[in-house]
Amino acid sequence: GPLPERRLMDVRLGELPAWLATRDFSPQGLLGGLQKAWSSYYDKYINVKRGGPAGISMLLAGYCLLSYGWNYQHIRCHRWRKYH
């Protein structure tokens, strides 16, 4: 199909700059993209007929990795302190 209608995973590496130029980077466009990503995640992993704990556990694992990344500098310095 046309380049603006393709998904990111369908775009080839050489077409990436042209594809990015067709994206809407306004606050409303970014909010719409975030809403679309959340609804597709929700439909794929959480809102399923025979769902299991996979969607929720993936969300919690992502939160754990994100919080570890935010606190890494503090954790790294804390590791070298001596307690005696």
Image (cartoon, grey):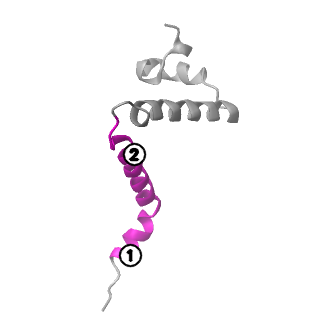
Quarter assignment of residue 50: top left
> In the image, 84: left or right of 75?
left
Q: Is residue 10 above or below residue 77?
A: above
Distance between mark 2 and mark 1 Cα atoms: 31 Å
User: Which of 36/76 is in front?
Assistant: 36
At 58% across and 31% down in the image, what residue appears?
33
| Furthest-bottom residue in this view | 84
Q: Position of residue 38 (x, y in %)?
A: 52, 35
Bounds of the magenta segment: 51-79
User: Which of 15/2 is in front?
Assistant: 2
Amino acid, disc 1: His
17 is within the stretch colored magenta: no
Q: Is residue 63 visible?
A: yes
Which disc, if any, is residue 54? none
At 44% across and 33% down in the image, what residue appears?
47
At 49% across and 7% down in the image, what residue appears?
1
User: Which of 44/49 is in front?
Assistant: 49
Q: Position of residue 66 (x, y in %)?
A: 44, 53
Whether residues under marks 2 and 1 lie with C-beta atoms below 8 angstroms apart, the answer is no
Which quadrant is the C terminus positioned in? bottom left
Which disc, if any, is residue 56? 2
| Residue topped by disc 1 | 78
78 is within the stretch colored magenta: yes
